[in-house]
Amino acid sequence: MNNIIEKVRKFVEDECRKPTSKYGFEPYEYHFAQVVRHAKQLAKEFGADEEIVEIAGWLHDIGSIMIGRVDHHLTGAKIAGEKLQEFGYPVEKIALVKNCILHHRGSQKMELETLEEQILAEADAMSAFDNIVGVFKAALVYENLTQGEALKSVSKKLESKWNQLKFEKTKEIIRPKYEAFKILFEK
Ligand SMILES: [Fe+2]
């Protein structure tokens, strides 16, 4: 087991377990772990740096957990930089991880510069389809929407996640779930 990855994973797990975690412990299992799983698979497939995408996958939403959703790409990159420095991770690799975190939000319309950044953004968009219950929970519980509003909001969100997918390979993997969602929830 790679020590730095284990340290990072444990840091994220511990933060998600704290009562101060903005979204409780669930994102650890249902979001972070899924993003890491997809990111590693894509890194293998496309020959990207697996260590960078795995570390970025664990840390990409840490700002959201520790501080809140607003600007979590900025707060997350800062927290990740400090933590990785504390763990003695090389400076040039920290910069690569931070860029993945800074650029992971599909909604922010930023240029993705490296393959590792593209992979993290892709894995993040894919993970919404692994956890549709979680997307509904965000709408119903955290945003306090009515059922009708939540349905509209979730449909819009999944449509946008689908449109963020860039690789043919990932579209192939996600397409059945995207189409099933449309059959189940759209009139
Ligand atoms: Fe995410």
Image (spheres, rainbow, N blue to C red):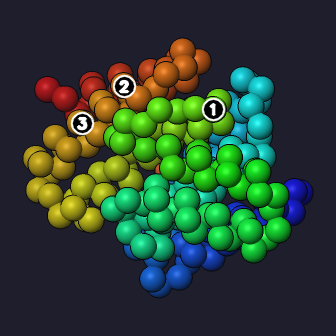
Mark 1: secondary structure: loop
Which is more foreground, mark 3 or mark 1?
Answer: 1
Q: Which residue is mark 2?
A: 163
Q: Sequence-wise, which precedes: disc 3 or disc 1?
A: 1
Q: Is residue 149 above or below residue 177?
A: below
Q: Secondary structure at mark 2?
A: helix
Location of the C terminus (image quadrant): top left
Task: Identify the residue position indicated by label 1 in the image.
Answer: 114
Check disc 3 and report the residue beneath it.
155
Nearer to us of marks 1 and 2 is 1
Disc 3 is placed on an element classified as helix
The answer to whether marks 2 and 3 mark residues whose Cβ atoms lie closer than 8 Å is no
Question: Which quadrant of the view contains residue 119?
Answer: top right
Vertical comparison of 160 with 56: above or below: above
Q: In the image as oriented, which residue stretches furthest toward the bottom?
A: 19
Beta carbon of the mark 2 residue lies under 8 A of ligand 1: no
Where's the N terminus, which quadrant?
Answer: bottom right
CA gap between label 2 and label 3 equals: 12 Å
Left or right, 90 with respect to 35, comes to: right
Q: Report the Cα–Cα distance between label 3 and label 1.
A: 30 Å
Residue 128 visible in the shown view: no
The amino acid beneath tag 3 is Ser
